[in-house]
Amino acid sequence: MSTEGLVIGRTNAGKTSFCLRLARVLGIRELNWLVERTDGVTQRRRMDVREAEEILTSGDAHQTRELQTLILSVPRGKVDRVIRVTDTTGLADGLHQDASVRKAMAQTLRSMLQARVVFHVIDAASVGQALKRARDVSAFHLDYLDEQMIALGKSRQTYVVLASKMDLPAAQEGYRWLRQHLDKGCVVPISAREGTGFQEVKRHVWRLA
């Protein structure tokens, strides 16, 4: 299944919350998901946005273990265009003990090679907290996994870093660091909880239409 927009990031960065808030911002109340399992089987799933928020978002790692493509209708001129934004399994360091999680992470990496637009969700609050703990802020850098995702993301047609969880303490400091160390034009601060930053996100989503 080809991918237009892909949402990637570490576990618990806020990828699924981002997708669900995006649907709300676009005025969608019933979600139309196309789910591609790691065994290649594709299924269709429909659910209310509120139900999806209760089922699909939690503090547990690896809640998403397949590609979940949200089919969205967005206005483009006098007509609506259908676009696809795909939520993915969160990536983590090392070799995960669960084989199903390993397969899901491999599926995420393969999908990055097909995506036109990559939305890389980075937890800005966690970055800010790490900066506070750092002995030498001038030498601070993101972990190897995020750096690899940045390198691969930049090879895509459009690459956007989403500095997530901006409603949390330390997020502003994390966002400032991301803007200084990445291309300033591609870092968008967002809060899925409060819905901030999504007007800018919509501008990038419309590129898919």
Image (tube, rainbow, N blue to C red):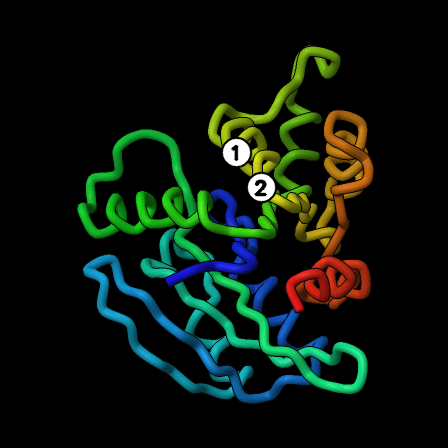
For label 1, the SS is: helix
Q: Depth check: 155 or 85 in front? A: 155
For label 2, the SS is: loop
Spatial CA distance of label 2 from label 1 is 7 Å
Pick the quarter of the image with the C terminus. Answer: bottom right
Q: Depth check: 119 or 190 in front? A: 119
Is the C-beta separation of discs 2 and 1 under 8 Å? yes
x 61%, y 62%: residue:
18
Amino acid at dot 2: Arg
- Residue 205 marker: none
Q: Name the image quarter holding residue 135.
A: top right
Q: Depth check: 93 or 171 in front? A: 93
Amino acid at dot 1: Leu
Where does label 2 land, which residue? 156
Q: Position of residue 58 (x, y in %)?
A: 46, 63
Badge 2 crowding class, 10 Å Cα cut-off, few under 14, some 14 to 19, many 20 or more, is some
Badge 1 crowding class, 10 Å Cα cut-off, few under 14, some 14 to 19, many 20 or more, is some
Where does label 1 land, which residue? 152
Q: Position of residue 175 (x, y in %)?
A: 76, 39
x 52%, y 55%: residue:
6
